[in-house]
Amino acid sequence: MAISFSINGRSVQVDADGNTPLLWVIRDVLDLKGTKFGCGKAACGACTIHVDGEAVRSCSFAVKHAEGKQITTIEGLASGDQIHPVQQAWIDEMVPQCGYCQPGFMMATAAMLDKIPNPTDDDIDANIVNICRCGTHYRMRKAIHRAAQLSNTQNTPS
């Protein structure tokens, strides 16, 4: 089945079984390796991407539902040479330990900050439910608050 969508600002058409998880199309067909496989059950969040701006677990999102949608992966989070405030905050706060789950956390955070520009700790707890086996949640919380500050600074008129 031919399925057309935009990924990271680029129009693509893929030929795949419509029930194939979008994760595998992203990784194996489009060769974008930043989105990770974690659990395959939409529980851990390592595979989080944006579909029309919403955080989605791509391991359980059939590619047929991507038809006509705008998909963003970690590779498309930056704007040209300018990294996204979430990516900058992750660097500033030295968040990753092993780093495997971090693309999913960053994508979930970016989607949350679009809806909640100044999240409280309760907002973070309610919205960022990905799993990190290394236990870097404390550093991630600091990075999320830092990303909110960076985003608000970028969006403030000069």
Image (cartoon, helix red, strand yellow):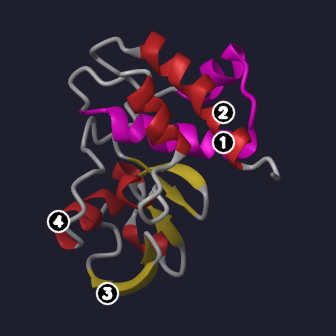
Residue corresponding to mark 2 = 148
Residue 28 bears which disc, if any?
Answer: 4
Residue at screen point 73% across, 19% down: 120
* Label 1: which secondary element: helix
Image point 82% across, 52% down: which residue? 157
- Between the residue at mark 4 and the residue at mark 1, the CA separation in whole angstroms equals 33 Å
Vertical comparison of 125 with 88: above or below: above
State the image coordinates of residue 118 (x, y, percent, origin top left): 75, 30
For the question of whether residue 67 can be seen, the reply is yes
**Does residue 108 belong to the magenta stretch?**
yes
Q: Which residue is mark 1?
A: 151
Asked if 33 appears above or below 11 in the picture, the reply is: above
Q: Nearer the viewer, residue 21 or 133?
A: 133
The one of 77 and 38 positioned closer to us in this rendering: 77
Give the magenta range.
100-128
Which dot, 2 or 3, sits closer to the camera?
Answer: 2
Q: Distance between the Cα atoms at labels 4 and 2?
A: 33 Å
Secondary structure of the residue carrying numbered label 3:
loop
What amino acid type is highlighted by mark number 3? Met
Q: Quadrant of the N terminus?
A: bottom left
